[in-house]
Image (spheres, grey):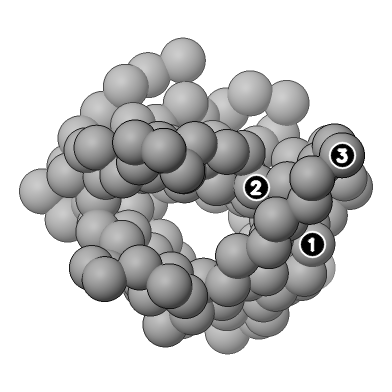
Amino acid sequence: MTNILGPNDKISGTVSGWSVPFQTSFVAHLNGEAGFNSTVGIMTDHALLKISIDQDIRSGETYAIGATDTDHKVRLEFDDTRAGNQGTYFASRGEFTVLQLQDGVLTAKFHFEAETRGRRVQQMSFSSGAFTVENFKHVRAASSS
């Protein structure tokens, strides 16, 4: 497990109802666990975005986003940490499109809908997502010759 902050690490997007856009002030990588890369994007005093991505993804492909306890190739959880608004949201639907995956740098765009669990369900919408991380551990499928 490694914690790395690269100069190109950035996750951003628009959260419906927020007066400011989501933009990371810190990105931590936990790569290689069980065939997934896990990334935590932290926006100080606002939120944490936890996203796990299967190491066997392809540039140009679009993947459905699911909650962290699903079998999706892209799994997502969003913790709202703003004072008076705390809550954990689990992705209920969304898409993650890999724009480029080269030399360990993953660039993608994404959007998702998420909701809390329990008695009082709350929903959130995240759009215009941009995702760039370094040190992405990628498993390439064997090529046939």
Under mark 3, the amino acid is Arg
Question: Which residue is under mark 1?
Answer: 92
Name the foreground residue: 75 vs 137: 75
Please say if 63 is above or below 137.
below
Q: Amino acid at mark 2?
A: Tyr
Q: Is residue 116 above or below residue 127?
A: above
Which one is earlier in the sequence, the residue at label 3 or at label 1? 1
Q: Does 94 sit left or right of 106 as displayed? A: right
Residue count near mark 2 (Cα–Cα under 10 Å), binned few <14, some 14–19, many ≥20:
many
Query: Which residue is drawn at the image coordinates 42% and 82% (left, top)?
Result: 128
Mark 3 residue crowding within 10 angstroms, few (<14) / some (14–19) / many (20+): few
Instruction: Return the residue nearer the eye: 120 or 94.
Output: 120
Most extreme residue toward the left is: 7
Residue under pointer 2: 89
The residue identified by callout 3 is 119
Q: Above or below — where is 6 with respect to 126?
A: above
What is the distance, in whole Å, between disc 1 and disc 2 at their CAs? 9 Å
Residue 96 at what x, y percent from top left? 61, 72
Q: Earlier in the sequence, mark 2 or mark 3?
A: 2
Kindly identify the amino acid type of the residue bearing the numbered disc 1: Ser
Residue 3 shown left or right of residue 40 in the figure = left
